[in-house]
Amino acid sequence: MKIIDIQIIEFGGLENRRFTLDGGLNVFEGDNETGKSTLWLFIKFMLYGMAKKGTSERERSINRLSHRASGTMTLECDNVEYRIERSFSENSRGKVVTYRTDTGERVFADKEPGEALLGVAKDIFESSCGIGQSAASSLGGEKGAAAIRNILSSADESVDIDKIQKRLEAIRVYYRHKNGKGGKLYEMSGKINQLEQRLEKASENRMRIAEIEEKLEKNAQVTAQNEEKSEEIGAVIETARKREVLRRFDALGENRRKKASLDEQIEMHKSRHVRNGYMPAATDVANLNMVASSAERISAAVSNAKDALCEAENNIPFDRELAQKGELIEKNGGAIALNERIRKSKKIILLGITLSGIGVSFALVAAFIIFVSVVTKLPGIIIAAVDLAISAIGIAVACVWGAKNKRICREYGKKNIKELSEYIGLCAAAYEKRNEYQNSLLELNSDLVRAEEQKRIIEADLERAIRRVSQDLPVSAENARAEAERIRNFLDEYSALVRAKESICAVIENDEKILSVYDESELRAFVADSGANISDRELRDAENKRKFYDEQIRVLRQRDNNLRTELINLKATAEDPTAIADRLAELRERHAEADNYYEAVVTAIDGIERAAASLQGNITPMIGHKAAKMIEYISNGAYSAVNMGRDLNISLTDGVGLTTTEEMMSGGTKDASYLALRISLMMQIFEKELPPLMMDEVLCQLDGTRMKRIIGLIGGLCEKEMQCLLFTCHEREAEACSELGIKAKIHKM
């Protein structure tokens, strides 16, 4: 089989890509993550469908954006060209169509294209034709190795020796486990034992059924005797019961008379205490006590407010004369402004005195200069005149402001500024105290007004509360409390009478309900004809006897119920001993037949194992011979023989006879050895129609020499009978093809 054309619509990270392949060697060259391995997955997808859900291969195969995979692939097999079209979506089932390109006829409708064209399942195809990244030494897992062993054992890939052996082993295990404690034969032996036990149990059940039926008959006779005695005693007890009902009728009449008496007492009590037709309640007691307390509190509050106001009016805490002067000061701008004026006048007077002193001093200096020097007489006179003028101005200023200060002192009746300053402070303090006093009087007066207003409101509430229960009672807190106490006593007595009445009414209602089913006159007539009364002791004795017989009846009936339940269960589950004996004989016969079949299966397993060993000895050397030639060529004669075990593990023998096991091989030698083994196995499995050999980065561990030899080996096979797809991220494979003159198509990814 050879792949002609690949067209990827969307698959993994590849979209709208097309590859046309040669029938020989095709080298796909590209960096990592350019889609080489994805292309190999696409070929498997076209031949065998999408990988299983949850696997990494499936995640790499589906486009991450569209969650789909689709494309076409054209291939040639047995000189017939086929075209495969396949699509897959996560949300729907996949679809595949295969048809012949020459006729357009659809083929392989019930098979995967790979199985129909190559005759092998997907795991065999992967294990033989495909060598993945860094996996040259893998035979494709347990399934691939097992499938290849079918070839070695039977010389026919359609015969699955492992399945046959497993099936026979399953049959053997089905009949008898290795430990002897499981399997069909073990179960049949167990059933034989069970039937033997059931036969014994069935015989016991038959005897038990007869025993139960006899006990039920005896219990029925004893129960009938006890019922007769219980009925005789019951007649006596019934008469006593009817006498008790009559006594209850008498008690009912007495209670009705008591109820009528209580009704009269209640009405009499109400007539003595209810005023103006109003029936007081407990809320009236609480309301009267509450408004009485409120009235007492507000009266005390009004009295306290009056006392506080009177005391404040009689105790004036300030000097009225000083307060009046303080008021005058406040009208003239306040104490602060007046003190400021005084301080300012002091400064101006001091300035005038200072100016006058300076002027006199400079005038004396100028007179001395005039006296000493005739030359400076005129200027000196002018200077002296100016100084005298300054001195005169200072004196005038000091006199004017001094006069103002004296006038202010006279206004407030003080001699000097110092006394005035102290007096201003006293007047301001008195004025402030007067204001505080007046404010406190206003506040006390407001408190008194509010208290009196509240008192009027509470007195109105008190009057309404009293008038609610009495129209002629004077309004006062004392009367309210007295009325509340009277109502409370009335309600206590009234409630006691009502409760007594309700209690008797409940008894009457209960007795009437119970006695409603009896006819009093009929009961009295029956009791009159029944003769003498029985005593309470005789009644108790009769009741005890009746209880005794009733208990005996109950116990017997309970025993009967238990016996009947047991009898029903026994009859429902009881088996016929004769039928069980027949089944036991049949099962023993079947056990003997199964034991003979088991021995035949064991014999078949031994024969197949011997035959498989014989066939493997003939075919394994053929694969080893082909692989040895390839290894000898690749290693340039370093190794001349290949040894293979049952699980296809290999070892190499060099020219001097030394053996190198798989664990001792280098990575490159191991890859080269298993590559040769893979090609040999593929040739053995696919004798007529070789599929393409897929190699994904399998030469990366080989040195240049061995890499070229493998390229030469593959190139020679491609020229004769095989197509090869080599995926690599290096350029040395393509260069080796060119150097060796091997025809190869290079695909740049």
Image: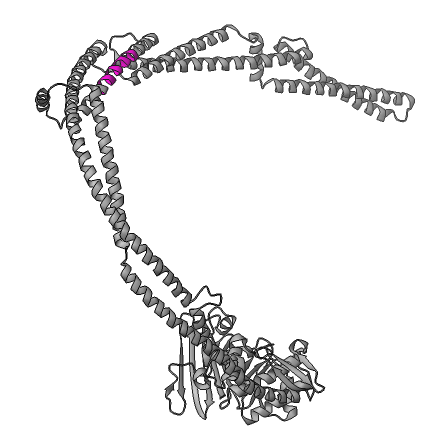
Magenta span contains residue 461: no
> Is there any visible trace of residue 391 in the rendered image?
no
Task: Judge whether 342 appears above or below 33 on screen.
Answer: above
Dividing the picture into quadrants, the one containing residue 664 is bottom right
Magenta span contains residue 501: yes
Dividing the picture into quadrants, the one containing residue 95 is bottom left
| Rendered image coloring scheme | one colour
Q: Where is residue 128 in the image (x, y as percent from the top left)?
A: 53, 82
Q: Which of 406 and 698 is in front in this view?
A: 698
> Magenta residues?
487-502
Q: Which of 32 and 719 is in front in this view?
A: 719
Task: Judge whether 517 appears above or below 447 on screen.
Answer: below
Q: Position of residue 434 (x, y in %)?
A: 54, 12
Count of numbered labels shown in the rendering: 0
Tell me what residue is drawn at x 59 percent, y 89 percent. 626
Dividing the picture into quadrants, the one containing residue 515 is top left
Q: Which of 414 and 704 is in front in this view?
A: 704
Q: Which residue is situated farthest in the top direction here?
A: 314
Q: Where is residue 749 in the image (x, y as percent from the top left)?
A: 56, 81
Q: Nearer the viewer, residue 709 or 177?
A: 177
Task: Judge whether 731 appears above or below 602 on screen.
Answer: below
| Left or right, 278 with reference to 53 | left
Tell me what residue is drawn at x 45 percent, y 93 percent. 79
Q: Where is residue 108 in the image (x, y as percent from the top left)?
A: 39, 84
| Left or right, 598 with reference to 462 | right
Tell me what residue is drawn at x 19 percent, y 34 percent. 226
